[in-house]
Amino acid sequence: MHWAGEAVIGAYCHGNPSMGNYFEVDIATGKVLRSYIGFGFVRSPDYAKVAHVGWIIHFAPPWVQSQYLMAGDTILYPLPPGMKPVVQKPLEMAPEVVKQQGLVYAGVHTFPVRFVWSPDSRYVGLLDCLVDYRLRDDSPEAFEERGVEENHRCFVVAVALDGTFRRTPVTPAADQAVTLHWTNNRTLVATHAGGSVTLRTSR
């Protein structure tokens, strides 16, 4: 639990390893002001928005559990090319961004680091790590094995509330922790044991 405003309490409730519920409650009236499904909830500095990973299906194959960033009820990133941010109804699947290429499910997203808001609450900074899953064949048994991971890559990403984003590659060793922080409203820095990467937004 935490304060989400002068008279508002925010609370996170665990659902299962793939989903939780976030509520904001007015302490004077008991009214629920906001309610979101997902995990990794982070309040914006202006208290007007909540960034989080959207709802995914528990126990689904990893390519179905590809993660996506939301601000409140709106999916911001990643989206198919040309698509604007989209409002997600409860328990509705996100737009498909993972591409199936034969036995390979390409471009599965994972956000391993806590989201960080820019000081002016206009951008969300994140670490986006992608991987492809290759099945050994097209049998049901191979599908249940969930495939072999390949083609790991990670990016530092700054996502605006209109869904536009900038990103740059980052290549820390697998055992190195990455931390994200904004030095000002438009500069996001990712730091790890091997160095740092700086990403500046377009405006």
Image (spheres, helix red, strand yellow):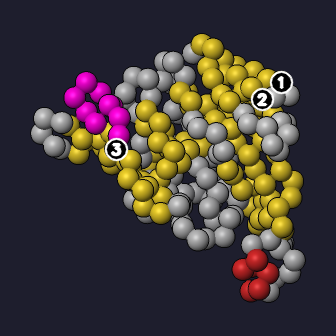
Helix or strand or loop: what does disc 2 sit on?
strand
Q: What secondary structure do most residues of the magenta stretch adopt?
A: strand
Q: Where is residue 202, by image quadrant? A: top right
Marker disc for residue 192: 2
Q: What residue lies at 58% left-to-right and 71% top-to-bottom?
A: 59
Disc 2/disc 1 C-alpha distance (Å) = 5 Å
Q: Measuring 49% from the left and 50% from the top, which residue is drawn there?
A: 39
Q: Give the range drawn in magenta.
A: 1-9
- Of pointers 1 and 3, the one earlier in the residue sequence: 3
Q: Which of 31 and 107 is in front in this view?
A: 31
The amino acid marked with disc number 1 is Gly
Mark linked to residue 195: 1
Residue 107 visible in the shown view: yes
The crowding category of the residue bearing disc 2, from other C-alpha atoms within 10 Å (few below 14, some 14 to 19, many at least 20), is some
Circle nearer the N terminus (2, 3): 3
The answer to whether the residues at label 2 and label 1 have Cβ atoms under 8 Å apart is: yes
Which x, y percent locates residue 170? Answer: 81, 34
Q: Is mark 1 on a helix, strand or loop?
A: strand
Residue closest to the far top: 184
Name the residue beneath numbered marker 3.
11
Residue 5 in the image: above or below residue 63: above
- The amino acid type of the residue labelled 3 equals Ala
Measured from the top left, where is residue 162 in percent x and y?
53, 33
**Does the magenta-highlighted stretch encompass residue 60?**
no
Local crowd size for mark 3, using a 10 Å CA cut-off: few (<14), some (14–19), many (≥20)? some
Q: Residue at x 74, y 86 (%)?
A: 140
Q: How far apart are marks 1 and 3 (CA)?
A: 36 Å
